[in-house]
Amino acid sequence: MAVTGLSASRRFLRGRARTGLVRSKNSLVPALQMTVCAVGAYAFAQYVLGHSGPLFAATSSLIALGFSREPRLRRVVEVGLGCTIGIAVGDLLLHWLGDDIWVAAVVLFVSILLARFLDGGNIFTTQLGLQSLLVVLLPAPAGGPFTRSLDAVVGGLFALLVTILVPKDPRREPRKDVRKLLHELAEVLRECASALTYSDSTQAWHALVRGRNCQPLVDAMRQTLRASGEVATLAPAYRRHRDELDRLEQSLDYIDLALRNSRVFARRLTSAINHAALSDEATENLAEVLRETADAIDELSLGLGEVHDGVRRAHLRAARKDLSYVAGRLHPRMLDVDRLEGETVVMLFRPLMVDLLEATGIDSKEARDLLPPLQDES
């Protein structure tokens, strides 16, 4: 028993060590930026402005940069302003009220209320309150009561400068997000295919739940794209990637619609399975369509998440070709569907297919034209 416990502990420690090493490796560039920024702000305030021990120049720049998931200029500005305003409020109240302990309580209380008035963000409130409190608790600098406020401004400006001139690649996070999102959509369709194969309406309902759980991923990607767009607009090194980010944002709109349609489809499929609305041949054909669509979504994911233009275009062409082939079969008669409820299932899958085709880059009319007409031409 003790040997088993020791072995489990070793595995846990090895796993933690590997995770820590990967995390440290991925943090090398941000850590270097934070170090250069904090030390640079401190040196500028001390040697150029002549401030003695400008601690707040270093701390405000360090806090403003931090470790964040996306390259968000708004976060840097928000935290930098929080530090600066907090220090200014602390300096002002300290100048008026003195440095007694009750002043610290007043400063903190006023700073928190002011932060909530200016911005609803938790980070902004925390930084404004913390910095104003430190102003009261730490000894006043030799340069006067508002020296620390100027130091905070210097730190915030250095953080903003580093964010603009040496940002993270703004395409990195949106690419990760779109791959994750399309993986979930593909798995929703595979679960639906499995539910059909095994006539398991519960599994179809699980696919519906999984599709609903994708909405936070969509919302997170929209936020990431907005933040990345800010960086691509202001950072000279990445301005040329604005078009790619715009295309990703456009694709996200279609993927969002496809996810919404997948939820409608899964809900209707649950009912169709419960009412045995599909024959064996129709079940097999529709399950095959779902699996082929999921495979095409995987190809689309590779295309939208690819770095190199040539490889990206190749994957998108392959996804477009595969989806076009599936779209050409989306007619109840071609899938051996003969009951009304089964026909409804097929009809609900058609707009989802149009959304996916548009996500590959073709226009709406061309995507709709790939679907077989519902009425025979006379």
Image (cartoon, rainbow, N blue to C red):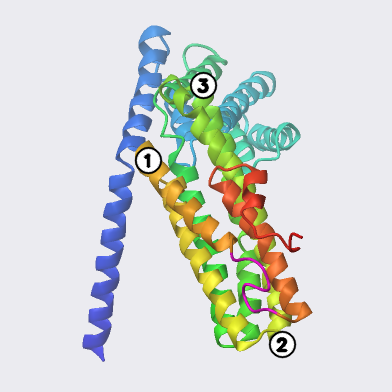
Looking at the image, which is closer to me, 232 or 187?
Answer: 187
Q: Which residue is mark 2?
A: 274
Q: Which badge, 2 or 1, comes first in the chain's sequence?
A: 2
Query: Mark 3 and mark 2: span between their CA atoms?
Result: 55 Å
Identify the amino acid type marked 3. Answer: Leu
Q: Is residue 219 visible?
A: no
Relative height, residue 346 to residue 168 (above, below): below
Q: What segment is highlighted magenta in the picture?
A: 329-337
Q: Which residue is mark 3?
A: 234
Q: Which badge, 3 or 1, comes first in the chain's sequence?
A: 3
User: Which class describes the residues within 10 Å of circle 1: few (<14), some (14-19), or many (20+)?
Assistant: few
Judge whether residue 126 is colored magenta.
no
Report the magenta stretch's main SS. Answer: loop
Q: Which secondary structure lies at badge 1?
A: loop
Query: How many labels sit on residues?
Result: 3
- Please name the residue shown 57% across and 15% down the image: 146
Relative height, residue 207 to residue 97 (above, below): below
Query: Mark 3 and mark 1: span between their CA atoms?
Result: 21 Å
User: Which class describes the residues within 10 Å of circle 3: few (<14), some (14-19), or many (20+)?
Assistant: some
Estimate the x, y position of residue 189 in percent, counting from the top left: 56, 69
Relative height, residue 207 to residue 150 (above, below): below
Q: Do the residues bearing badges 3 and 1 touch, measured as CB atoms within 8 Å?
A: no
Residue 89's quadrant in the figure?
Answer: top right
Q: Quadrant of the C terminus?
A: bottom right
Identify the amino acid type marked 2. Answer: Asn
Q: Which residue is mark 1?
A: 307
Residue 3's quadrant in the figure?
Answer: bottom left
